[in-house]
Amino acid sequence: MDSSTKCPDAPTSQISHTRTPKTLRKQDIKTLALSSLGGTLEFYDFIIFIFFASVIAHLFFPASLDPFWSTLNTYGTFAAGYFARPLGGVIMAHFGDRNGRKNMFMLSILLMVIPTFVVGILPTYESIGYLAPIILLLVRILQGIAIGGELPGAWVFISEHVPKKHLGFAIGILTGCVVGGILLGSIVAFFINLFFTPAQITAFAWRGPFILGGVFGVISIFLRSYLKETPIFKEMKASNALVKLPIKQVFYKNKTAIFISAILTWILTGCIIVLLLLIPNFMTQTLQVPQTHIILAQMFAIFAVAIGCVLSGTLSDLLGLRKMLFIFSVGFSISCVVYLYLLSHQGSVVAVFSWYIIAGLFAGVMNFTPLVMVSIFPPNVRFSGISFSYNLAYAVFGGLAPIFVVSLFAHAPMWVGYYLGFLGVLGILVSLLWHKRA
């Protein structure tokens, strides 16, 4: 194992332990609340695209395209946002490690607001031809750059504010609220489908959630203006412990940490992109139930994931991180296989929805991705190390997931269950092998 994975170099190691309060102070709670709510609103902006993927496929690509290829192009545009994440993440993380966490925290939301609003007013293919999908692609790239620095920055920001004893709980709240951004998107999509006909949604109603996202972005900017710089960064700056080129030190001293982070991020993509965002579309194709029922099931599953994140973090504080990573990985693997078995074999709707929610609860395993990452990267390169590892892995595994999983489901739905089960096994291996090496 790399030395930096065991322990950071001396100056920053001391800095990382200077804050020793055992309870969350009023300022910690305020910081956690503002960061979490801001993350909820920003991730709503980024994720609302997927809830109207079929409408976007119809409006922004030629009508002559086969429906499969039209949908695939839409998911490809969605994936472009993920491929742009490493660029934005590395750049913002560099300045976050050099100039402060809060500055980049503010920049990420500024870069998200305008593109989201643009989607809401963007002319369709019928109006401006191929310029429509090109602009849509550019908008997603800008959003990807913004989101690349958002979540790593939020994890670092919170981890450097709260006492270590409550780190799991705090990260769980933050990650659960970010998942709440997806829930907010599903709630908006639910009411759009409830109050508007399919023809009205295609004609104009789909634009509302994106325009609303622009409003949410302004609220996020306002909320984050009240945040303060992290104590750890202030101490590093005062003691001249900052690194001139953080990403270089990450490559030089943190290779094992990068690998562990990439594996855990792969698991996270399965929880978010596959389980929460793609599978509801598969249920629409398989189950003979109204679309609003599918969206309602998705909402419950998203809420279950948020609860799972808080639960996994709280139990990690009490019982140990590696033990809980093992338990949640086992639960995630088994529940996903059972759920996809029922879905692919046309089990009862109640059974399918119930196991979907159970799988969502165990998808709280995704909370161990940030919990491990903030622990294994030294403070002076923490933002850069997390951002590079997380965004690169998300670009690869998250960007390819829609195309890969859609193809898997078209071949044999049960293979999607095997894929998610495999991700659970990866979590088990990390908990066992990392424990031995540590």
Image (cartoon, rainbow, N blue to C red):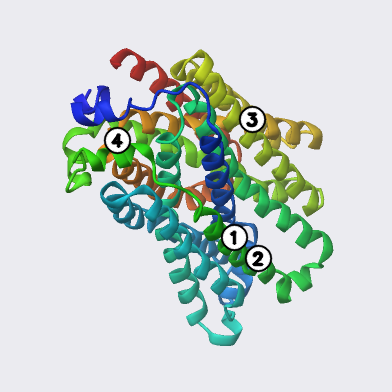
* Cα–Cα gap, marks 3 and 2: 29 Å
**Alpha carbons under labels 2 and 4: distance apart:** 37 Å
Q: First in sequence, mark 3 or 4: give its number.
A: 3
Comes first in the chain, label 3 or label 1? 1
Residue that carries the numbered disc 2 in the rendered image: 212
What secondary structure is found at the residue carrying circle 1? helix
Q: Which of the two marks, 1 or 2, is nearer to us in this view? A: 1
Of label 1 and label 4, which has the lower sequence position? 1
Q: Nearer the viewer, residue 358 or 8?
A: 8
Is residue 408 visible in the rendered image? The answer is no
Q: Quadrant of residue 138?
A: bottom left
Structural distance between the alpha carbons of marks 3 and 4: 31 Å
Instruction: Tell me whether circle 2 and circle 4 mark residues in contact (CB < 8 Å).
Output: no
Q: Nearer the viewer, mark 3 or mark 4?
A: 4
Alpha carbons under labels 1 and 4: distance apart:
30 Å
Q: Looking at the picture, tell me which residue is in the foreground, 323 or 53.
A: 323
Residue with the mark numbered 3? 361
| Residue 389: % across, % down | 33, 42
Which residue corresponds to the image point at 54% horizontal and 55% vertical from the top-left? Answer: 42
Residue density around tag 4, few if under 14, some if 14–19, many if 20 or more, within 10 Å: many
> Label 3, label 1: how many angstroms apart (C-alpha)?
29 Å
Q: Secondary structure at mark 3?
A: helix
Apparent side of residue 12 relative to residue 124 in the rendered image (left or right): left
Question: Percent position (x, y) of residue 146?
Answer: 43, 59
Could you tell whether 318 is left or right of 203 in the image? left
From the top left corner, tell me how far across and down residue 377 is, in percent.
30, 33
Q: Tell us which disc is closer to us: 2 or 4.
A: 4
Q: Secondary structure at mark 4?
A: helix
